[in-house]
Amino acid sequence: MVTSLLERPIFVGVDTHVDTHHVAVISEHGKKLADREFTTTAAGYAEISHWLPTLGSVIRVGIEGTGSYGVELARYMRRHGYDVAEVPRPNWRLRRSQGKTDTIDAYAAARQLLDGSQLTPP
C-alpha cells in the first residue's frame, strides 16, 4: 500500500531566535525532508502552519526555547491543533562535532522527537 505524501507522518523541529525561526521536517525514519526560515511574526507563524501540511501529517512539533524566543510560536501552534513539545538545545559535543547552524539545530530538534527523550511540555 502506497501512502500519499500528505499522509506520511512527519516530525518538525524549530531552532528559535529573536527575528527568525528555522524549521526542519523529517520523516518517521529520520530522513531530512525540508527546511526553511520564517519570521517571528503572526504572518510567519501562519506560513509555517500552512507549509507543514504540504509535507505530510504532522505528528509533533519540537520547539527550542518555548520559555523565551519560541513562546509565541508554541502558543500559535497549540492553538492551531499541533502537538508541541519543548526540546533542549543540542549539547556542546554535538555542536562541536557537527558544527553550529540554524539548519543543524532545527534538524536536531526534530530528531529528538523520534526518541522522545528529554522532551517537556512547553
Image (cartoon, rainbow, N blue to C red):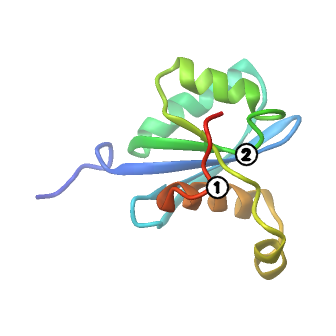
In what quadrant of the picture does the N terminus appear? bottom left
Q: Is residue 20 left or right of residue 62?
A: right
Vertical placement of 67 versus 99: above or below? above
Q: Circle 1 — which element?
A: helix
Residue beneath the point at 66% across and 33% down: 122
**In the drawing, what numbered circle is on residue 64?**
2
Is the C-beta separation of discs 1 and 2 under 8 Å? Answer: yes
In the current view of this chain or complex, which residue is farthest to the left? 1
In the current view of this chain or complex, which residue is farthest to the right? 18
**In the drawing, what numbered circle is on residue 38?**
none
Residue beneath the point at 79% across and 33% down: 67
Q: Circle 2 — which element?
A: loop
Q: Is residue 96 left or right of residue 94?
A: right
Vertical placement of 15 versus 104: above or below? above
x, y percent for residue 117: 56, 58
Q: Distance between the residues labelled 1 and 2?
A: 7 Å
x, y percent for residue 8: 32, 50
Corner quadrant of residue 92: bottom right
Residue type beneath disc 2: Glu
**In the drawing, what numbered circle is on residue 109?**
1
x, y percent for residue 47: 61, 29
Residue 107 or residue 114, whichever sits in front = 114
Corner quadrant of residue 44: top right
